[in-house]
Amino acid sequence: IYGVNDGLGAVFGIVSGVAGATGGNANYVLISGLAGMMASALSMGSGAYLATKSEREVYEAEMQREKKEIDESPDEERIEMELFYQLKGFTPDEAKKLVDRLSASPDQFLKLMAHEELGLSEGQFPSPWTSAFSATISTALGAFIPIIPFFFTSGYPAIIASLIISTLAHFAVGAAKCLVTIRPWWATGLEMTGVGLLEAVVTYGLGLLFKAAV
Protein backbone atom coordinates (compact mmCIF):
# COMPACT_ATOMS: atom_id res chain seq x y z
CA ILE A 1 0.00 0.00 0.00
CA TYR A 2 2.79 2.41 0.92
CA GLY A 3 4.72 1.73 -2.29
CA VAL A 4 1.70 2.06 -4.57
CA ASN A 5 0.63 5.24 -2.80
CA ASP A 6 4.11 6.75 -3.05
CA GLY A 7 4.47 6.01 -6.76
CA LEU A 8 0.92 7.09 -7.57
CA GLY A 9 1.20 10.35 -5.64
CA ALA A 10 4.64 11.28 -6.98
CA VAL A 11 3.95 10.63 -10.66
CA PHE A 12 0.40 12.00 -10.49
CA GLY A 13 1.98 15.25 -9.34
CA ILE A 14 4.56 15.13 -12.12
CA VAL A 15 1.92 14.40 -14.76
CA SER A 16 -0.33 17.18 -13.48
CA GLY A 17 2.49 19.72 -13.45
CA VAL A 18 3.83 18.82 -16.89
CA ALA A 19 0.31 18.65 -18.31
CA GLY A 20 -0.42 22.13 -16.99
CA ALA A 21 2.80 23.49 -18.49
CA THR A 22 2.44 21.79 -21.89
CA GLY A 23 -1.33 21.60 -22.35
CA GLY A 24 -1.21 17.83 -21.96
CA ASN A 25 1.40 17.18 -24.65
CA ALA A 26 1.69 13.39 -24.60
CA ASN A 27 5.38 13.29 -25.50
CA TYR A 28 6.45 15.52 -22.63
CA VAL A 29 4.12 13.87 -20.15
CA LEU A 30 5.24 10.35 -21.08
CA ILE A 31 8.93 11.22 -20.89
CA SER A 32 8.59 12.93 -17.52
CA GLY A 33 6.10 10.37 -16.20
CA LEU A 34 8.20 7.36 -17.14
CA ALA A 35 11.34 9.01 -15.77
CA GLY A 36 9.50 9.78 -12.55
CA MET A 37 8.21 6.22 -12.38
CA MET A 38 11.70 4.76 -12.71
CA ALA A 39 13.20 7.22 -10.25
CA SER A 40 10.47 6.65 -7.65
CA ALA A 41 10.59 2.86 -7.99
CA LEU A 42 14.39 2.67 -7.73
CA SER A 43 14.45 5.15 -4.87
CA MET A 44 11.82 3.23 -2.89
CA GLY A 45 13.48 -0.10 -3.63
CA SER A 46 16.96 1.00 -2.60
CA GLY A 47 15.56 2.78 0.45
CA ALA A 48 13.68 -0.34 1.55
CA TYR A 49 16.79 -2.49 1.03
CA LEU A 50 19.06 -0.18 3.03
CA ALA A 51 16.50 0.36 5.80
CA THR A 52 15.89 -3.37 6.29
CA LYS A 53 19.59 -4.15 6.12
CA SER A 54 20.37 -1.41 8.66
CA GLU A 55 17.71 -2.71 11.06
CA ARG A 56 19.23 -6.18 10.93
CA GLU A 57 22.74 -4.78 11.46
CA VAL A 58 21.53 -2.85 14.52
CA TYR A 59 19.88 -6.03 15.82
CA GLU A 60 23.08 -8.03 15.36
CA ALA A 61 25.15 -5.32 17.11
CA GLU A 62 22.75 -5.23 20.06
CA MET A 63 22.84 -9.03 20.28
CA GLN A 64 26.63 -8.94 20.40
CA ARG A 65 26.54 -6.39 23.22
CA GLU A 66 23.99 -8.44 25.13
CA LYS A 67 26.07 -11.61 24.65
CA LYS A 68 29.12 -9.79 26.03
CA GLU A 69 27.14 -8.73 29.11
CA ILE A 70 26.01 -12.33 29.69
CA ASP A 71 29.56 -13.63 29.33
CA GLU A 72 31.01 -10.99 31.67
CA SER A 73 28.23 -10.91 34.30
CA PRO A 74 26.16 -14.11 34.01
CA ASP A 75 24.78 -13.93 37.56
CA GLU A 76 23.54 -10.36 37.13
CA GLU A 77 21.87 -11.25 33.85
CA ARG A 78 20.17 -14.27 35.44
CA ILE A 79 18.85 -12.10 38.28
CA GLU A 80 17.63 -9.57 35.75
CA MET A 81 15.79 -12.28 33.81
CA GLU A 82 14.23 -13.59 37.02
CA LEU A 83 12.93 -10.09 37.77
CA PHE A 84 11.40 -9.87 34.30
CA TYR A 85 9.44 -13.06 34.94
CA GLN A 86 8.40 -11.93 38.41
CA LEU A 87 6.97 -8.77 36.86
CA LYS A 88 4.95 -11.04 34.57
CA GLY A 89 3.32 -12.67 37.61
CA PHE A 90 5.61 -15.61 38.40
CA THR A 91 6.71 -16.28 41.97
CA PRO A 92 10.44 -15.95 42.76
CA ASP A 93 10.81 -19.74 42.87
CA GLU A 94 8.99 -20.18 39.54
CA ALA A 95 11.07 -17.45 37.93
CA LYS A 96 14.29 -19.05 39.18
CA LYS A 97 13.30 -22.47 37.82
CA LEU A 98 12.45 -20.94 34.42
CA VAL A 99 15.77 -19.12 34.23
CA ASP A 100 17.64 -22.28 35.29
CA ARG A 101 15.95 -24.17 32.47
CA LEU A 102 16.68 -21.40 29.94
CA SER A 103 20.31 -21.14 31.03
CA ALA A 104 20.85 -24.69 29.79
CA SER A 105 20.49 -23.30 26.26
CA PRO A 106 22.78 -20.23 25.96
CA ASP A 107 21.49 -19.22 22.51
CA GLN A 108 17.86 -19.35 23.63
CA PHE A 109 18.72 -17.47 26.83
CA LEU A 110 20.45 -14.75 24.78
CA LYS A 111 17.45 -14.34 22.44
CA LEU A 112 14.98 -14.17 25.30
CA MET A 113 17.16 -11.73 27.21
CA ALA A 114 17.39 -9.47 24.17
CA HIS A 115 13.65 -9.70 23.68
CA GLU A 116 12.76 -8.95 27.30
CA GLU A 117 15.34 -6.23 27.88
CA LEU A 118 15.53 -4.54 24.48
CA GLY A 119 12.33 -5.67 22.75
CA LEU A 120 14.34 -7.24 19.93
CA SER A 121 13.11 -10.19 17.92
CA GLU A 122 14.85 -11.77 14.93
CA GLY A 123 11.50 -12.47 13.28
CA GLN A 124 10.91 -8.73 12.88
CA PHE A 125 13.30 -8.42 9.96
CA PRO A 126 12.32 -9.52 6.44
CA SER A 127 14.89 -10.15 3.74
CA PRO A 128 16.38 -6.89 2.39
CA TRP A 129 16.02 -8.21 -1.16
CA THR A 130 12.38 -9.10 -0.59
CA SER A 131 11.71 -5.63 0.78
CA ALA A 132 13.54 -4.02 -2.14
CA PHE A 133 11.66 -6.07 -4.74
CA SER A 134 8.29 -5.45 -3.11
CA ALA A 135 8.86 -1.70 -2.77
CA THR A 136 10.18 -1.35 -6.33
CA ILE A 137 7.33 -3.25 -8.00
CA SER A 138 4.54 -1.70 -5.93
CA THR A 139 5.88 1.82 -6.49
CA ALA A 140 6.28 1.24 -10.23
CA LEU A 141 2.72 -0.09 -10.50
CA GLY A 142 1.31 2.93 -8.70
CA ALA A 143 3.43 5.34 -10.72
CA PHE A 144 2.35 3.84 -14.03
CA ILE A 145 -1.36 4.53 -13.49
CA PRO A 146 -1.43 8.33 -14.15
CA ILE A 147 0.44 8.08 -17.45
CA ILE A 148 -1.67 5.32 -19.04
CA PRO A 149 -4.05 7.67 -20.97
CA PHE A 150 -1.13 9.49 -22.58
CA PHE A 151 -0.18 6.34 -24.47
CA PHE A 152 -3.45 6.57 -26.38
CA THR A 153 -4.36 10.25 -26.56
CA SER A 154 -3.08 13.74 -25.80
CA GLY A 155 -4.25 17.16 -24.67
CA TYR A 156 -7.19 17.72 -22.35
CA PRO A 157 -8.87 14.35 -23.03
CA ALA A 158 -5.73 12.66 -21.70
CA ILE A 159 -5.56 15.02 -18.73
CA ILE A 160 -9.18 14.32 -17.80
CA ALA A 161 -8.75 10.56 -18.24
CA SER A 162 -5.60 10.63 -16.11
CA LEU A 163 -7.42 12.59 -13.43
CA ILE A 164 -10.28 10.09 -13.36
CA ILE A 165 -8.24 6.90 -13.19
CA SER A 166 -5.76 8.41 -10.74
CA THR A 167 -8.57 9.57 -8.47
CA LEU A 168 -10.14 6.11 -8.56
CA ALA A 169 -6.75 4.55 -7.85
CA HIS A 170 -6.19 6.86 -4.88
CA PHE A 171 -9.56 5.85 -3.47
CA ALA A 172 -8.87 2.13 -4.02
CA VAL A 173 -5.45 2.30 -2.37
CA GLY A 174 -6.84 4.33 0.50
CA ALA A 175 -9.71 1.90 0.97
CA ALA A 176 -7.23 -0.99 1.02
CA LYS A 177 -5.70 0.48 4.18
CA CYS A 178 -8.74 -0.79 6.07
CA LEU A 179 -7.10 -4.23 5.85
CA VAL A 180 -4.50 -3.10 8.39
CA THR A 181 -6.40 -0.38 10.26
CA ILE A 182 -9.68 -0.20 12.15
CA ARG A 183 -10.96 2.80 10.18
CA PRO A 184 -13.85 2.41 7.68
CA TRP A 185 -12.76 1.72 4.10
CA TRP A 186 -14.69 4.70 2.76
CA ALA A 187 -13.01 7.08 5.23
CA THR A 188 -9.47 6.00 4.34
CA GLY A 189 -10.39 6.00 0.65
CA LEU A 190 -11.79 9.54 0.74
CA GLU A 191 -8.82 10.75 2.77
CA MET A 192 -6.29 9.54 0.23
CA THR A 193 -8.45 10.79 -2.64
CA GLY A 194 -8.56 14.26 -1.10
CA VAL A 195 -4.79 14.33 -0.67
CA GLY A 196 -4.26 13.19 -4.27
CA LEU A 197 -6.66 15.77 -5.70
CA LEU A 198 -5.07 18.56 -3.67
CA GLU A 199 -1.66 17.54 -4.97
CA ALA A 200 -2.96 17.50 -8.55
CA VAL A 201 -4.53 20.95 -8.25
CA VAL A 202 -1.36 22.46 -6.78
CA THR A 203 1.03 20.92 -9.31
CA TYR A 204 -1.28 21.67 -12.25
CA GLY A 205 -1.48 25.28 -11.12
CA LEU A 206 2.30 25.45 -10.81
CA GLY A 207 2.58 24.01 -14.32
CA LEU A 208 0.35 26.79 -15.64
CA LEU A 209 2.49 29.35 -13.87
CA PHE A 210 5.68 27.87 -15.36
CA LYS A 211 4.08 27.96 -18.79
CA ALA A 212 3.13 31.62 -18.38
CA ALA A 213 6.61 32.48 -17.09
CA VAL A 214 8.35 30.77 -19.99
Image (cartoon, rainbow, N blue to C red):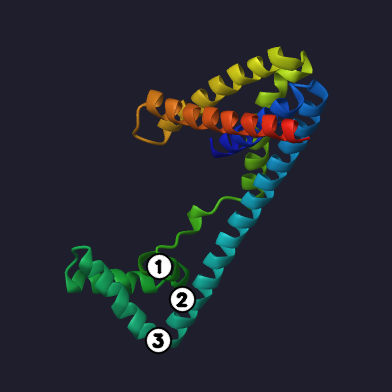
Camera-side residue of 209 and 122: 209
Alpha carbons under labels 1 and 2: distance apart: 9 Å
Mark sitting earlier along the chain (1/2): 2
Q: Locate the C terminus and report the quarter of the image it occupies.
A: top right
Tell me which label, 2 or 3, sits earlier in the chain.
2
Residue 160 % position (x, y): 64, 15
Residue behind mark 1: 118
**Which label number is shown at residue 66?**
2
User: Which residue: 65% across, 45% down?
Assistant: 44
Choose top left, top right, bottom left or bottom right for residue 199.
top right
Callout 1 secondary element:
helix
Callout 1–callout 2 Cβ contact below 8 Å: yes
Lower sequence index among marks 3 and 1: 3
Quickly name the residue at label 3: 73
Q: Please rate how many residues cluster around mark 3, counting C-alpha atoms within 10 Å: few if below 14, some from 14 to 19, many from 20.
A: few
In x, y percent, where is residue 93?
19, 73
Furthest residue to the front? 213
User: Would you identify the image quadrant in which residue 42 lies?
Assistant: top right
